[in-house]
Structures are given as structure tokens and as C-alpha cells.
Amino acid sequence: MPENIFARVRAAVVTALRQVVPDLPDDVADRVEVSPAREAAHGDMATNAAMVSAKTARQPPARIAQALAAALVDGADVLRAEPAGPGFVNLHLRPDSLRATLPAILREGEAFGTSGAGQGRRVNVEYVSANPTGPMHIGHCRGAVVGDALANLLAKAGFAVTKEYYINDAGAQVAALAWAAYWRYLQAVGTPLSEDEFAAMVPGGLQYRGDYLIPVGEALRAEHGDALSGPGGTVADPALWFDGVRSFTVAAMMASIRADLAQLGVQPDVFTSERALVEAGAPDRVIEQLQAKGLIYEGILEPPKGKTPDDWEPREQTLFRATQFGDDVDRPLRKSDGSNTYFANDIAYHADKIERGAELMVDVWGADHGGYVSRMKAAVQAVAGDRPARLEIVLCQIVRVMRGGEPVRMSKRAGTYVTLADLIDEVGRDAVRFTMLTRKSDAQMDFDLDAVVAQTRENPVFYVQYAHARCRSVLRAATESYGTAALDSMALAQMPLDSLQDDAELALIRRLASWPRTVESAALAQEPHRIAFFLYDLAGDFHMLWNRGRDESTLRFLQADRLAETMARLAMVAATATVLRSGLAVLGVVPVEEMR
């Protein structure tokens, strides 16, 4: 069983609470939490056990806290317990129990913190899923990083995770892309048409004019010659070229997107095509399934917001009874002309995930899709029926790229926005990934190019990487003095640790001990930014110890005349480096050995 002192102490608290409150219901016991104390003076941990059980016990929380504290005294891990505030109990751990975290880390390595909380539940995390109509940009980047880190986090917490990309390759936008690629093809052939003349022939106009489609047009010319064009490079009948150009262009754009994702360190396990689902009849089948459940009817919607019956033409549509599942209105699945809506396609896609065994689906969307959440959750609930499947949505707000306090545009290919490739070229993959996780996903953020490359405490990725590099520098120096065998993790795990008594040392160990709890709580809350926050705080604890050690001989890491103390501190440094690497792996960031 992986070491988790918080889980162990929580179990002791629940056992003691059952003595104080007989016949404690399991659902009340499940709400008991043991969390790090906010201030070291108040102890190592605190529990809300008295507060959550007060209603069941029909006693004031303070009275339960008093009895619970008495029951916890002299436990295996708890040295003393003290009632506090309106019903909390502060817990002071035995120093040996706290220090035992270090050998556990050294034995488990980067697996330390791995949790069984997920119990192998199958989770599908779908993220990015950008329309394949252009290069990936900064907005896609945030969703990609958040989704990838969340998937890593859920896997570390014991879930069976599938990372998925949904290719939106059906509908009007992809049709417009095909026309735009065809224009670049005609240019490669040598068309006499001007861009405006061609645009006048395109249904809805020429929407995508970026230079990124020039290579696609040239590739079409290389494969087909002038066979796709009309006489003299004019527009041929779309029936002769449209489907082939659309498929070719989507494949080319997806190859570009895959390359951008790989550069970011994102590699989905599954790519699912919307067009393939549509062509296989999946939306029609899911409509039939909902109809069999009595959840479909023919009706007329109320006028949309801002419209009145006078300026809105009502049409009969096939509607899903979304209001039965918490949505505010029923939703159309089939238009009056008999074609399916995008919503029908999306329901079919999620039904496909359920059929593939997903018990939990997590979709990472841009914040502009916030109005789509309630209807999608309603649909999944309806489709799932009695099957253990549910949908959670993580929304990502917009990101502005800044330099010198001003928004910047860096793209030569796109012109109007910052591409992912340009951003990575500017600051590097690790800086992009870590920085994107320094804010909660639903909070807007400014990506400051100057701050991201600054070597200061205000730059979180530098601050954390520097802590790991300092740990490694200590261990390299120790290897030169004591040899490789002495610095082996298993050897360090055997070292006496009684000399680790300084407040700064204990604060660092206390932080290390909270890593398993952080993993579990962040995974269950689906908030990977908590890992970035933890790493920043852990780095701060280590930097504080490092800076104190430069002035206080008792805290120096390497002291030839105090071998036992030196080896204990080396065990602490090695454990710190291990947890930093473990956390950075969740974020998809590569730790550095030394700072240049």
C-alpha cells in the first residue's frame, strides 16, 4: 500500500469518532476530512470530524471536538490533539511518523503519491478537439495543457484514463475549408481568377484565407495535376472534386495539428471522426433510442432570445425532452428540412464513448461553449440510462499573450492570432505547459512573455525547476564525496533521521507528506492547477532551507565532520527532488538537472 500519512491519520480519526459518536452513519464518516494545518503553530493537520458529525450526535461540535481530542491522544501517529475554534481538532504528529515519509518516498520513487482513489474507473478525457480549419492557436493551447495534465493526474489517482481528440470534420466549417483549399489549388495550377472573383463563387464566401493552406493547394496540384480544375484553371463542378479535396485537406490539417500537439507533449490515445460517426448513421440511431424512451417529440420552439413571433418564423422540429434532465428548454435534434443538428451528432459521439466503456467523461471546452453544458449533460443522462456513466465539463477561459504590457501577435502564417507553434518556439514547451497551469482554468489569464523567461521567483516554472536543479547539485556534490552506493535511494532510506529537527526541515517534510493527499484531492476536483501550486510551495520550502543553510552551519547539507546529519539531509534532498519530478511529470514538464 503506498505511503499516505493523511489517509492513515484520517482512518484513526474516523475510528476515534465512532467511539465518541456511536452508530455513526457511513455517509457522515465519508465527509470527515484531515487537511494540512494552516499554520505550523496549530499543528501538522486539522480535522472537521466534530463539525460534520454534530447533527447526527445531537451535540455541539465543540463538545464532540473535546471528546475526540481525548480519544486521539497517544495514537500511532498523533502525539497530541487539541480542540480549536467552532469544532475543529488540531493534530500534532509524532516527529518520527512525519520523518518516516522520507524513506517511503525513497523506496517508492516517483510512484510516491499514486492513489487508488479512482479504483480503476474508466475515464475518457476529451480535449483540444479543434476544428481542423487552421493552425492551433493560444486558445487551443490552454485546453490542450489542462486536458493533458488532468488526464495524467487522474491516472496517478488510480483511474483508467483514455485521452481523446474529437475531429470536428463534418458541417459548414469544413465545407468552407474545402473551398479555401481548392482556391489554393487553383493558384498552384495558375488560375486566371482573382481572389475576389473566386470568393464570389463560394457558398458563404471565402472564409479561410491564411497562407497555411498554400502547401495544401500545392500538394493537391502535385497529386492531381490540373485534373480538378475547369478549363484554363477555372472552377470545376464541385461534384467532381469537393469530397476528395475536403478529405485531403482535413487529413493535411490533422497532420499539422498532430505535429503541434506532439511539440507540446500531447499525444491523444484516440482520434474520433465526427464525419465517420455521421456516415455510419450514429446520430439517427441515437435519435431512435431516445424516441423509444419517449424522450422525442415533434414541436415548435419558443422564439430565441432577442426574437419575437413577428420576426421569427416558427418551424416544426424534432425535439429532445432536455427539460426532464435539468435543462432550461427542450432542444432540437432534427431540423424542419430533415437534417440533423450538431447537437444530435454530439449526443451520438458521447453515446459512442459510453458504448466503448467510459464510466466518466470529462470534456475540456473553451469558455464560449458554457451555454452548451446543461444540454449536453442532460443528453448524456438520458442516453446512459441505468449505465454508470456521467459527464463533467471543464471550461477554459481565454488567454492573452503579452509583451511589455501590450497584447502581441506572433504568427506569420495566421496573421490575426498567436499560433501554438510560434509560442513554443518563443519560450519552450515546458514554460508553456507550466504557465498555463498557474491559473484555474475558468479564470482569464495573461501569458506574459517577459515574465515566462525571467529568472526570478515571480516566474513559477523557473522557481520550481531551480529547486530541482539545486537538489541535483547537492546530490552530485555528495556523490563525489561519498560515492554512488551511499547515495542510492535504498541506502538513503535506511539512514537515521532523528537529526532532522529544525523547523524549516520539518516544514519541508510536512509538505512532502501532503503530496499523496494533494494528488487525490486535485484529481477528484478535476483541478490540475493545484499541482502547479503545490510544486511552487514545495520549491519555496526548499529554497528557504537552502538560503538559511548558506548562513547557518547547522543547516548545511554537506558537513564532513557530521556524517549522520549529512546523510539524513541528503535523504531529505533526494526525497524533495523525487516529489518535484513526480509533480512535474503530472504537468508534463521535464525537470532540469542544472540551470544555465
Image (tube, rainbow, N blue to C red):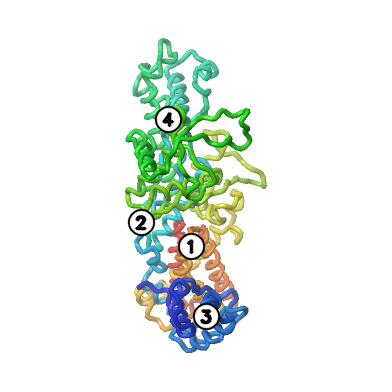
Residue linked to disc 4: 339
Q: Earlier in the sequence, mark 1 or mark 2?
A: 2
564 and 452: which is toward the camera: 452
Residue linked to disc 2: 122
Q: CA distance from mark 1 to mark 3?
A: 31 Å
User: Mark 2 belongs to which amino acid?
Assistant: Arg
Question: Quick one: which residue is furthest to the top in this view?
Answer: 231
Q: Earlier in the sequence, mark 2 or mark 4?
A: 2
Q: Secondary structure at mark 1?
A: helix
User: What count of labels does the image hold?
Assistant: 4
Residue 57's disc is 3
Q: Residue at x 40, y 30 (%)?
A: 249
Q: Position of residue 431 (x, y in %)?
A: 52, 53
Residues at circles 1 and 2 in contact by the CB criterion of under 8 Å:
no
Q: Nearer the viewer, mark 4 or mark 3?
A: 3
Q: CA distance from mark 4 to mark 3?
A: 59 Å
Q: Earlier in the sequence, mark 1 or mark 3?
A: 3
**Label 2: few (<14), some (14–19) or many (≥20) C-alpha neighbours in 10 Å:** many
**Label 1: few (<14), some (14–19) or many (≥20) C-alpha neighbours in 10 Å:** some
Q: Position of residue 172 (x, y in %)?
A: 47, 29
Q: Is residue 428 visible?
A: yes
Q: Nearer the viewer, mark 1 or mark 3?
A: 3
Residue 332's disc is none
Q: Is residue 389 left or right of residue 74?
A: left
Residue linked to disc 1: 522
